[in-house]
Amino acid sequence: MTVTFRTQSRHGYSVKFSPYFPNRLACSSSQYYGIAGCGTLFVLELRPDHLVVLRTFDWSDGLFDVAWSESNENVLVTASGDGSLLVWDVLQEQGPLKAFKEHTKEVNSVDWSLTRGENLVVTGSWDTLIKIWDLHSAQSLVTFRGHDSIVYSAGWSPHVPACFASVSGDQTLRVWDARKPNFPTRVVPAHSGEILTCDWCKYDQNVLFTGGVDGLIRGWDIRNTQQQVCELRGHQYAIRRIRTSPFMATKLISCSYDFTTRIWDYTRPEALEVIEHHTEFVYGLDFNLHVPGQIADCGWDELLHVFRPQSCIPAP
């Protein structure tokens, strides 16, 4: 069964399940594409046949990505079109709690470190910069320079402390050590066009995946990037987001400007399942960490869906 919520008058850009509560998720949205539209953060609770709004937070610019805190079940951070990193608390009606504004252009990506001893946040922006933040500090801790174009996505390794990956309009995948900001540890010319998304494998610390405007998903082993782990074809247009399964070692999901969400086993060349329940660009995508095979996606058609494709359910 698919449960649907309408982000009224808002394009859905990112959706994330809570790492604490199996029935809670958040969606960041924007009135329309670009820096002029206002944005809304929806915090939702999943019931058996519908989604209930727990809290909404409005901002004067678009909210393009969202991440849950790994140290406080009620705190979230969002990436904004005005260049700011915003901190919200579900228990507080007014917000944000904090607003950090160092990026000079839209912030596309925000991710909270999974190695909880660090408690760090990474952001990527149209200004080509990546920044790392400790939300208890008034300013960012460090800025990473090296990409020559928009940084579309930056995400922490779930395995290795202080390690994160980024992808950019400069057609490269870069792997970084947060303690050594001057140079990336790897630079991979991963696609022939802009790269919009990346995600680490949850079962192998050396493997990650990229998706680009060429419609391709490519897998990489960072120990040897001369040969791809896989190349998955099927999307007709740009791939906006990839998420790897927390329950099945070879499964991943992707969503695209071709209006589809697709389920893959990266050891096979073709998609296991193609989901066509959006009528516009699909932007946001996530796996539920508590319910095996449950997915949420959102898009420009103002719809957020929570569903459990048969191809994602682990075998008993």
Image (tube, grey):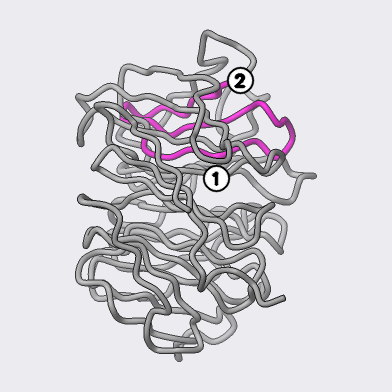
Residue 154 visible from this viewpoint? no
Q: Main secondary structure of the magenta part?
A: strand
Q: Which residue is mark 2?
A: 89
In this view, the residue farthest toward the top is 94
Q: Which residue is mark 1?
A: 111
Q: Is residue 67 magenta?
A: yes
Residue range corresponding to the magenta coloring: 64-88
User: What kind of residue is marked 1?
Assistant: Asp
Is 219 placed left or right of 235 in the picture? right
Tell me the quarter of the picture where residue 270 sits: bottom left
Q: Is residue 30 magenta?
A: no
Is 209 placed left or right of 185 in the picture? left
Q: Is residue 9 above or below residue 296?
A: above
Most foreground residue, 85 or 28: 28
- Label 1 sits on a secondary structure element that is strand
Is 88 placed left or right of 28 in the picture? right
Q: Is residue 168 above or below residue 274?
A: above
Q: Count how many numbered circles sit on residues in the image.
A: 2
Residue 215 visible from this viewpoint? yes
